[in-house]
Image (cartoon, rainbow, N blue to C red):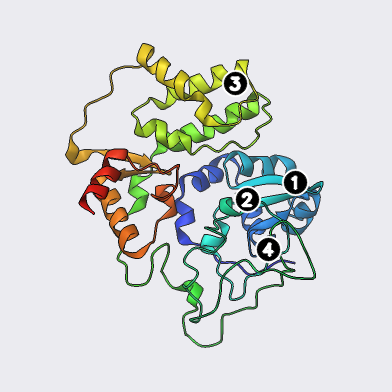
């Protein structure tokens, strides 16, 4: 059953979303429809024909091609549990905050993390809810699955007849109340990283790899190390041509390093003043990274578009910045 959902205004200037408006416009209403069809954990049943009837009933289109486009651009992922296919929507729970979230479909820890859960909880769960109301993934004794989900019900219409602003309409974004916006992220999006991630996903599909939706987070590390994105992609395609069943991007590290040592042009020198680092899908100045670490130390809040948090093994913050923070503590 479809549910009322929120749309964050930042999605309209998201690089991958803007690419959809050019390459595959019909994938946009499909994506928005999947938000409505998914349960409160961002999980939905992978039934293309049913989704076509419910979301795009009048469109003359190939639903399989549209869904494949969303997969290639990392908006959704597919997985199986007990022989049934399901889909997960990336970072869904970060922007959807129903009053009493419930879950219908099973999902692994990996898929829940992909949907935005952190340590089994919804990030910034206190925003838009009365104090004391939990925002965790709920469980039910009547329906057992791999993540303890319970049957989900439609979210009621929270918009009253008065002019009072609904909690989901307040411009809190990815910040806690009282925190000032530090920098306009739109100007910091690194198109090289978006192009590299899209190319990697296409390379896996072209190689008919068993890994249909690879985790492309490693691409940001390569760019942070100063590697050329086109050369990185050439190495990935070359290796996949010989070994199509590679399952992790870490496998390409040594080949990329070796190829750059032999063929890449010298890396341009950069002064400390204009030094930026690719973290997540954004080019962050060092000052912004230091400020994000300060907020992490003081309030325990970490913005998802900076990549994994400092306590995560895949954190992309340059080691010398982390070491300097630790020495100053």
Q: Does the rendering let one see residue 222?
A: yes
Q: Which residue is mark 3?
A: 240
Is residue 14 found left or right of 225 in the rendered image?
right
Residue 27 x/y as whole percent: 63, 47
Q: How many marks do you count on the picture?
A: 4
Label placed on residue 39: 4
> For the residues carrying marks 4 and 1, which lies nearer the camera in this image?
1
Is there a contact, CB below 8 Å, between mark 3 and mark 4?
no
Is there a contact, CB below 8 Å, between mark 4 and mark 1?
no
> Which residue: 46% across, 34% down?
219
> Which residue: 58% across, 68% down?
136
Q: Which residue is mark 1?
A: 80
Q: Residues within 10 Å of mark 2 (few under 14, many from 20)?
A: many
> Which residue: 42% across, 64% down?
173
In primary-sequence order, the first of circles 2 and 1 is 1
Cα distance between the residues tagged 3 and 1: 25 Å
Cα distance between the residues tagged 3 and 4: 36 Å
> For the residues carrying marks 2 and 4, which lies nearer the camera in this image?
2
In primary-sequence order, the first of circles 4 and 1 is 4
In primary-sequence order, the first of circles 2 and 4 is 4
> For the residues carrying marks 3 and 2, which lies nearer the camera in this image?
2
Q: Residues within 10 Å of mark 4 (few under 14, many from 20)?
A: many
């Amino acid at each position: 059953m479809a549910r009322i959902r929120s749309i964050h205004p930042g999605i309209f200037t998201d690089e991958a979303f803007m690419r959809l408006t050019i390459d595959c416009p019909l994938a946009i209403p499909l994506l928005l429809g999947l938000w409505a069809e998914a349960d409160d954990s961002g999980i939905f049943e992978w039934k293309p024909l049913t989704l076509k009837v419910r979301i795009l009933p009048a469109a003359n289109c190939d639903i399989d091609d549209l869904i494949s486009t969303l997969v290639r651009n990392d908006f959704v992922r597919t997985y199986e549990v007990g022989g049934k296919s399901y889909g997960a929507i990336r970072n869904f729970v970060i922007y959807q905050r129903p009053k009493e979230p419930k879950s219908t479909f099973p999902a692994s820890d990996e898929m829940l993390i992909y949907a935005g859960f952190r340590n089994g909880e919804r990030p910034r769960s206190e925003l838009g809810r009365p104090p004391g109301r939990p925002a965790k993934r709920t469980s039910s004794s009547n329906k057992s699955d791999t993540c303890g989900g319970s049957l989900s019900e439609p979210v009621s219409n929270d918009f009253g007849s008065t002019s009072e602003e609904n909690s989901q309409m307040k411009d809190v974004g990815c910040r806690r109340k009282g925190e000032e916006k530090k920098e306009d992220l739109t100007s910091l999006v690194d198109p090289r990283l978006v192009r590299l991630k899209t190319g990697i996903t296409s390379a896996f599909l072209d190689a008919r790899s068993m890994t249909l939706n690879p985790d492309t987070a490693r691409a940001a590390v390569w760019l942070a190390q100063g590697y050329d994105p086109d050369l990185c992609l050439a190495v990935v395609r070359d290796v996949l041509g010989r070994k199509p069943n590679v399952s992790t991007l870490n496998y390409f590290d040594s080949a990329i390093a070796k190829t750059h040592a032999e063929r890449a042009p010298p890396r341009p020198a950069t002064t400390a003043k204009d030094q930026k680092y690719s973290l997540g899908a954004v080019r962050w100045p060092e000052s912004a990274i230091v400020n994000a670490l300060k907020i992490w130390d003081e309030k325990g809040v970490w913005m998802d578009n900076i990549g994994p948090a400092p306590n995560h093994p895949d954190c992309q913050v340059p080691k010398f910045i982390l070491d300097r923070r630790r020495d100053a503590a």
